[in-house]
Image (cartoon, helix red, strand yellow):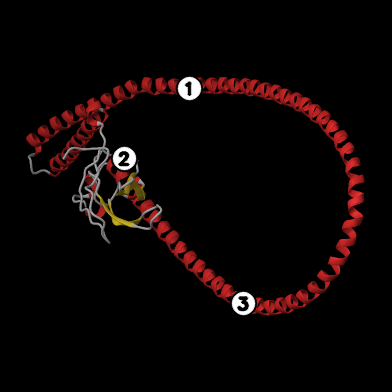
Amino acid sequence: MPKLSKCETKAIPKTDEVVWNSIGELDWVPGEALEFSINSAGPSGQKVVGTVVVPSEHFQIEGLHMELPTDGPESAALTVCITPQGVQMPFGMQGGAEGGKSMHEMRRMQKGYIVNCQTIENRIRFFKREEEKIWRDLEEVRRQAAKIEEGRTQAKERHFAERALNQVREQKLTENRVRASKQRLEMVSVRKQYTADTMASKQFNGENQRRDSQDILRRKRLEEAQQRLNKSERVVASQREQIESKLRSNQEKQAKLGQIRDAQQMAREDAEHDMTHVESRLPELEAQEMACLHRLQNSRIVTQTVLRELEASLGSNSAVTSMLRMKQSRSANLLGTYSAESDLNDTDLSPNGVGGAGV
């Protein structure tokens, strides 16, 4: 199966519980999280129903197989099974004696245990957060129910109050109608007298108002012209202030960009200096390692020579000969283990030995 950076399942018609049973293999890099998204197809196109993001520390050691809640406009859950390639078995299940393991393997196993503990702690924290969320939802439902009951009681009280107010309004309306009929008759006579008096005053006031309106119109035009002039002056001043503020902000941005460039250049120079120092020490350490290996091989040759001489003089069943032979076999096993580890480290450090694990 080819390794991809993205897998997509086939579309399934809408049902109560959708089951894909789809298997895919991704070109995954350790440390990266996996994102699962559920899409719904409709007349207007596809829309995201929910998403799930799984951090790498939840599956990169022992894998993951569980039901996860989705984040999205609709509440849903997705069951996933993630199995990384090259997963290490627990310490107690590996065969062989403990004396044959190197310090490198012990440290790698210890690191695996630490990551497993962190993964379990993260799951415990996740379950606690989900439990707190459920209790908060239940408390919110209880508060909403109390508010609904209180609203119903208040609605009944308002209904009774409105009924009493309607009765009072009807009574007042009847009284107002009787009073209005009496006042209407009185107003008819008063209106006739008032009409005769106001006709004369209107004619006199009309002439005065006409003259006053002409004066007011003239003053209003002068005020409008003055307001237009003041407004144009304010617009010019505001535009000048905006231009000056833009110039100042551009100058500040240029100064900040220069500081950022200088800081980046200094950090790059420090990193190059550290890398050069480390690379210069590597050949010296390799030469020391090879010298130690040659001395160990020479010691092994000398031991073999002494063993042959002792077997020739004391015999192969002698206690001294047996003890020397046992020490020689242990030294040979140690030298072989060291050579195998050196070959493995050389393979890992080579360009062809580095690659991303697939999921």
Quarter holding the N terminus is top left
Q: Position of residue 48 (x, y in %)?
A: 35, 48
The structure residue drawn at horizontal position 92% and vertical position 45%, both measured from the top left corner, is: 204
Amino acid type, label 3 = His
Q: Position of residue 224 (x, y in %)?
A: 79, 30
In this view of the protein, which residue sits in the foreground, 56 or 288? 56
Left or right of 203 in this view: 248: left
Query: Which residue sits at x=44%, y=65%?
Result: 134
Q: Which residue is mark 2?
A: 30
Q: Tell me the crowding category of disc 2: few under 14, some 14 to 19, or many 20 or more residues within 10 angstroms, Cα based.
A: few
The residue wearing badge 3 is: 159
Q: What is the crowding at mark 1: few (fewer than 14 residues within 10 Å), some, or many (at least 20)?
A: few
Q: Secondary structure at mark 1?
A: helix
Residue 111 can be seen in this image: no
Query: Hey, which quadrant is residue 6 in on the image?
Result: top left
Looking at this view, is 44 or 18 the one in front? 44
> Could you tell me if residue 301 is visible in this image?
yes
- Please state, as top left, top right, bottom left or bottom right, where the C terminus lies in the image: top left
Residue 65 in which image quadrant: bottom left
- In the image, what residue occupies the spot 69% across and 77% down? 165
